[in-house]
Each structure stands twice: as C-alpha cells, then as structure tokens.
Image (cartoon, rainbow, N blue to C red):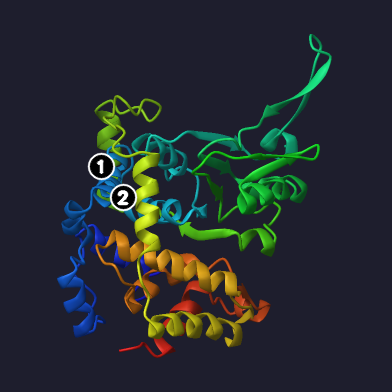
Amino acid sequence: MSNQPGSYTESAERYSGTAAPEAGHTGRDAASANHHGGHAAASGAGDPARQSLLNVRNEVGKAVVGQDPTVTGMLIALLCGGHVLLEGVPGVAKTLLVRALSTALSLDTKRVQFTPDLMPGDVTGSLVYDAHSSEFSFREGPVFTNILLADEINRTPPKTQASLLEAMEERQVSVDGVSRPLPEPFIVAATQNPVEYEGTYPLPEAQLDRFLLKLTMPLPGRAEEIEVIRRHAAGFDPRNLAAAGVRPVAGAAELSQARHAVAQVSAAPEVLAYIVDVVRATRSAPSFQLGVSPRGATALLNTSKAWAWLSGRSFVTPDDVKALSLPCLRHRVGLRPEAQMDGINVDDVLGSILASVPVPR
C-alpha cells in the first residue's frame, strides 16, 4: 500500500497502536478525537459491539501475521455491507485471512477457484432434475454464504464474472425467473494476482465499481516472515484454525448492532464537501482518463463513517476521508496510457490529489 501521508496503512497502524499520530492532524481534530476516545484500541470498552469487532483482529492475528490493515479493511467492508478486491502475490495468506476472519465472526464462508472453464451456474446454482419427483429443483451454488472467496476472479471469462453482478448489487440470485435472496450478511472477497496476467480477463469497470475497497496485501517484512516461519516450526497448521486458538468472538448480532451504530455517525457539511472535492479532482487529473463516479463518493463517505466508528468517534474527520481514499478510490480510476508509460501509478496520483485539495479546518 501507499506510504502517502494519511494513507490507510498508516491509519491502520495508528489504530493498532504501532505508529504515532500523523503530524497533519489539526488541533481541533486531535482534541475532538481525544474527547471522544479517538484511539480505537482504548475506546472499544465503552461499546460492546465495537469491542467485539476489535477483538476479531486479535483472533485473526493468531493465524495471520502482519496484515492488520487488510483485516481492518475487511471489517470496514462488513460494516458497510460492501465487497473487497484483494490484490497480492500467491502465498501472502489471502485465503487464510478470510477463513480466520469468518471463524472469528461466526460467519459461513465458501471458496470458489475461478478458472477459464467455470460456468455461471457453478457459482450461483442451477436447476437440477429430480428423477424421483420428476421435477426440477434449485441447487444452491457457493454464492449462498456470508463471505464468498472468489479466488483469482480475473481468470474466468466475463460471462462468469458477470454472474456475480446481481449477487453483489441486489443480494439475490435469479434463476428461471425466480429471485432467491442471499444470506445476511453477504460480501464477496475476490482475489487477483498483480504480476501474472497471461490467461486472465481484466474485470470490467462496471464490476470494479461494485467493489467497495481494493486492498493490497504486501509481502511481509523480515521480522514478520521470521514469525511466520517460527509458527510453522512450532507446528502451526493453516488448515486447523481451532488448534491455532482462533475462536468466535462476535457474530451476526454484533455486526448488525455495529452497522446500526455506524449509520448514526455524522459528517459535517464541510466534510461532505471535502469528499466531493477529492472525487471531482480525480475527474480532472491529467494522468487519469477515468475519474471516480458519484457511487465512489458515497462509498468514501460510508467507509469513512465506519472507520470513525471503529476509532471511537461519532463524527467523521477529514483524516478519516484521507485514510480511506486510496483503498476506496484506487480501483475506480483509470490511468492514461502515456502515464503508464511514464511509470506513474494510481496511488501516487491519488496521493497528489489528497495533498492539493484544501482540507476543511
């Protein structure tokens, strides 16, 4: 992830207590955050639902090392009812993270390996003829779950990718004219490999825009990788989370309470205008041929509210908006070919926009 000031990674580190507050905080923001318990780790005790979700991080940490920002992003997606695109090279624990998260939250999860020969019915389900009753019955596909891990989603043709669009947007599956609701909560956690594009089908813009967040999972640092090896040397089995001590610490009830609380988080008119200014700046950036849509603006607002609530506040600050701008917007913009040839990346441009758009005081 980007190291731009105010980035999601730095904010997540501050959230977990491993980094100092940013120098960019205004005195008013710092005072307000302190008054409302701005440090999430310290503020969770006052709200059982928040404390339960904060405890999820500790449980996932028993199985996954060094991916706190991604875990936090997944929690934000669950709080907002949105979907996540996970990008990382093979072997950085994408599948393990989703399994550990679903275990800690007492949620059902299913994994689908997306391949070139995967058919839409393999994901959504299909009608099956029953010889005993001489009737067709619907057999549910793996999409009927709480967290669907769509592994290497860009390796399947557009027809199969499109089969997820209704599920992602409408939370239902329509087969033979009958709409069947999906379980609640429901999110898609799709993965893709950022370095291997042979035999892949790039996701269309319409589908990318339906992902609430795009989170990048980096390779671990040296100390973190040593810890991974140490755990395996001590007998850690990634297929046996119970033996690793991962246990349920929250459930659908706590998540529902948390969603209700997030909906009550307020955003001042100045903050709303700041979100719009950031989004509109992406549409006029010389390096972008495609800017962020109004859907992206609402996504940035909702994720900022979730982040503020997790941080123990009942209001959104400009720093919350900055913290979520990269993961919320990076997949909603398109670089011009000449910018790509110059080695410019999306996160750098978004960082420049955040540095240039006036921050409300």
The image position of residue 164, as x and y in percent, is 67, 47
Say which residue label 2 marks: 66
Residue 1 is at least partly visible in this image = no
The residue shown at (43%, 84%) is: 274
Task: Name which of mark 2 and mark 1 comes first in the sequence.
Answer: 2
Question: Counting other residues with Cα less than 10 Å from the Cα at mark 1, is it few (<14), some (14-19), or many (20 or more)?
Answer: some
Kindly indicate the quadrant of the structure image that contains residue 107: top left
The CA span between labels 2 and 1 is 9 Å
Task: Count the labels in the image.
Answer: 2
The residue shown at (37%, 80%) is: 268
In which quadrant will I find the C terminus? bottom left
Say which residue label 1 marks: 227
- Label 1: state its secondary structure: helix
The image position of residue 286, as x and y in percent, is 60, 87
- Label 2: state its secondary structure: loop
- Asked if labels 1 and 2 touch by Cβ distance under 8 angstroms, the answer is yes
Q: Which of marks 2 and 1 is in front?
A: 2
Query: Relative to the observer, which residue lies in front, 242 or 258?
Result: 258
The residue shown at (45%, 54%) is: 77
The image shows residue 75, relative to residue 93, as above or below, that is below
What's the residue type where badge 2 is placed? Gly
Q: Which mark is residue 55?
A: none
| Residue that extends furthest to the top in the rendered view of this protein | 132
The image shows residue 140, relative to residue 298, as above or below, that is above
